[in-house]
Amino acid sequence: MSRKSGTDGSLLRSLPWTLFALAFAVAPHLQYLPPWVTLVAIVCAAVRWYIEKKRWRLPPTWVRIVLSLACFLGVLASYESVSGVGPGSALLAVMAALKLLETKERRDQFVLLFISIFLIMSSLLREQFIWSLPYLVLGVLITMTAWLRMSASRPTGLRQSFATGGRLILYAAPLALAMWIFFPRIATPFWAVPIDTSAATSGLSDRMSPGDISSLSLSNAVAFRVNFDDDAPPPRLQYWRGLVLHRFNGRTWSGGEPNFDYRALDDIQISGEPVNYQVTMEPTRQHWIFALDVPVQWSLQKTFMGSQQQLSREQPVDQRLSYEVVSHTSYRTDPDLAQFRRGWYTRLPENSNPKTMRLAQEMRSVAGDDEMFIADVMRMFNQQEFYYSLEPPPLGSNPVDRFLFNTREGFCEHFASAFAVMMRAVGIPSRIVLGYQGGEMNPLGNYLIVRQADAHAWTEVWLPGRGWQRVDPTSAVAPERIEAGIAGARYGGIGEIWGLSAPSALLHQLTLTWDALNASWNEWVLGYGPELQGRFMEWLGVQNPDWQKMMLTMLVVVALLIGAISVLLMRRYRPPPKDPAAVLYERFNRKAKLLRHRGEPPLTYVTRLTAENAALTGDAALITDHYLNARYGPPDVHSLQHLKAAVASFQGSI
């Protein structure tokens, strides 16, 4: 009789758990995976379940090979690479799906559960949010439960499987925690994982056109958080310098590549008290580093100051950074600007925005000097009908002309651009600074939250003997934007006329609470680096901790934990104590000097004993009767006492 070539249905009970574990492991990757990868995973899971249910054949080898090659080429086409977190996750997910099509036995399911563990861990390569820890624990628990239910020799309850899996995780947790705390941290990793660059990053760009920054004002994404050593400076002084734009083509402002200028710090003349603070900056995949205007000291390595007093980093910021800065809010820079540099900041394209050029020249001819002209332009923005708006109308060609003479509605970049063009039109050097202004103080953690909505553009003009001076035209049009910030305007009701909307007070409080938790997570967990580890070891009493001391400490702690866990396991799984009646009956067997066979019933044994030695018949029968009563009869303390007395008086064979 020929054997059926299809599946035998033996995996019907365990296959759903394997599919569930894989689905849970792939879930965090779905938003980053191409849609076709998700579709392949769903189709393969459904096909494999249907095959097992209908006892059909698995797809032949050549079909699986063709599908594997097609999926590999699909990943290569989607990412233009097969290395990195994105392509690696996609390959892992699609190969796990295809592995289902050749799963015949339980050992194949074990491989799939191994893959699910790798998928869970690989999600941490992108980001380690505060919810990553419960997701990690739950994912491992589900995978362990699937493993246990697959390995069980007999059906077990779901609650028991989850309890066993949870207990195993609890046993492993102290070891994982000890190794995380004591394993030596290094300043730079041994390797670097290429991060996806396909997803857009919210933040400032190295170019500015009308409407670019106003689009960021609707984003509540955190740009960075700031912890001040002392009191924070007032909002009107909270200008977070990012990059400087000095090229203008009639519509768009742009700047140069990040460069190092060893004279940049020497060109800063400071006064007043310094401001000391720590910045925790979110990834931007850009080179510039944000600091309170103007920084004079910083702790971040491979970071330099450019010729326009902006901080830049050699490599793009592709992970969260924490650095300390000392800034001065009272300063002046470049009091003696070189003549050739003045040309950079006064250049305008020919035949662009002619109305603005004529207006600036007319106003300058009336003003007594440059400073009075600057004051007149600021007064024009303040007194005439200019409006601050998040949704300004489109400007088209000659945008500065259309803004000043037609629409008169704009965001900070509109006012900064128009002001800078008017300055250049009369020969006053000017430039645009992009960064952030203000922020929102979180009382729960006493730190400042600077969001993408706080993105801002302002102007700097150069005056002889005074150097570069900050002039923010937005303060003339919407002073509440500078004094209260976007957050204050949003939640204080001022920003309603700008197009801002605020959630309820309860929702806002919950948002601040969640952000405080995230900040603590970033500081104490994700920020647990060499410095924090060193301070912790010194607190434990280890002076001048190096990697050898760290390794030795880790090995000692892990060894002690393994010993403690082993003791707990031995106590939990030690064999139960023998029944007192059985112990007394074994003593009777030794006195009788007749070996009792394994599994031999007491009545059979006593029959064989009395057959060999008839003199023991009475005593042996009495002891057997007491034993059966004490071991198998109703609970009775007298039965055990009678057995003990009978065994004690038994003399054995003569």
Image (cartoon, rainbow, N blue to C red):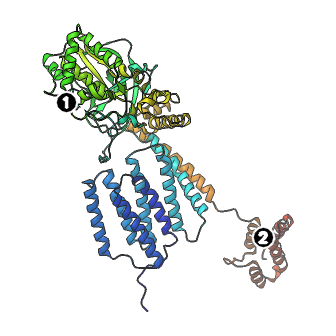
16 in relation to 34, above or below: below
Q: Is residue 337 visible?
A: yes
Residue 208, how many percent across, how many down? 26, 32
Give the mark nearest the N terminus, 1 or 2: 1
- Residue 631 got which mark? 2
* Residue ranking furthest to the bottom: 1
Helix, strand or loop status at disc 1: loop
Q: Give the residue at mark 1.
A: 250
Amino acid type for the residue under numbered disc 1: Gly
Label 1 to label 2: alpha-carbon separation: 102 Å
Q: Residue at x 30, y 68 (%)?
A: 67
Q: As drawn, is 20 to the left or to the right of 203?
A: right
User: Quarter-wise, where is residue 246 in the image?
Assistant: top left
Give the magenta range: 247-252
Amino acid type assigned to the residue bearing label 2 in the image: Arg
Residue 36 horizontal side relative to residue 599, left or right: left
Q: Which quadrant is the N terminus positioned in?
A: bottom left
